[in-house]
Image (cartoon, grey):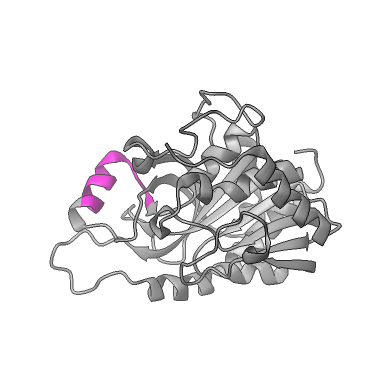
Amino acid sequence: MPTLYPLKAIDEATAFIHNQSAWRPEVGLVLGSGLSGLADAVTQAVVIPYGEIPHFPLSTAPGHAGRLVVGELGDVPVCVMQGRFHFYEGYALPQVTFPIRVMQRMGIRTLVLTNAAGGINAGFQVGDLMLIEDHINFVGMSGHNPLIGPNADEFGPRFPAANHMYSKNLRKMAQSVAAQLGLELRTGVYTYLSGPSFETPAEVRMLRVLGADAVGMSTVPEAQVARHAGMDVLAVSTITNIAIDELDAGSEPTHDEIQAAGALIVPKLTQLLLGIIAKLGTRAV
């Protein structure tokens, strides 16, 4: 059975963050591989390395700065994870999702997740943004779910529904903002695999048959825990590589390629998220 953090540990981390910053954000963001530069747009920022926060894991993946940034995006107080934790780093899923529990105790009601993903949909190109409408959770299906173990009744029910994982209202808002900005925002199904190996060509072809549009190694456990706690979730994938479906293709995916593509996508993603957050600041979420 996975080790679960007691409420005391979650509240100790929450209290530490509150003591470091006077901000009380209601919007949280998690930045994926190559996307940490988005945190540079946060003004009046208080930057807290993960290693200073009680009970927080440490980021070990390249391209994940490992810092919590609390401040303003536009005029909206936000809490930004500049780098996340992954199952493939050796962390149990309750560790991977610990910061989401902390965000909920901080008063955050809306969670925006971003990731770098491989394009499965044959119509996708590197540089595309994909709004996640739904997901396929192979890691969860194989018995690894962050909600396994004693239920945290303070957060949510024993058997949470999963058919409204990604908020319809937030998805409509994102599409409206993208249209106003003239940004192409694709929509699709994200598939969560454990990594750290990339997919075989046979796996890519299988995922396409199953209806996947993009594939990655994060995001889904965070969405599950956020929804369990009653938070509204919006998730955007940046297509940083095209998954290879031919056995003898001359190229292969690399993490360096993903980070380089992510850096190029950041300005477009920043535009989109700033627009969304501005709208969130004008209404009760």
Q: Quadrant of the N terminus?
A: top left
208 in magenta:
yes
Residue 167 visible somewhere in the drawing: no
In the foreground, 265 or 147: 147
* Residue drawn at 49 percent across, 69 percent down: 262
48 in magenta:
no
Q: Position of residue 46 (x, y in %)?
A: 78, 66
In the foreground, 224 or 164: 224
Query: What residue occupies the far left of the structure in this picture?
Result: 248
Residue 177 visible somewhere in the drawing: yes
Q: Position of residue 190 (x, y in %)?
A: 42, 47
Give the vertical position of 60 relative to 159 (above or below).
Answer: below
In the foreground, 265 or 88: 88
Magenta-drawn segment: 203-214
Q: Is residue 206 left or right of residue 137?
A: left
Query: What residue occupies the far right of the structure in this picture?
Result: 22
Numbered-mark total: 0
User: Please, what is the dominant secondary structure of the magenta stretch?
Assistant: helix
The quadrant holding residue 252 is bottom left
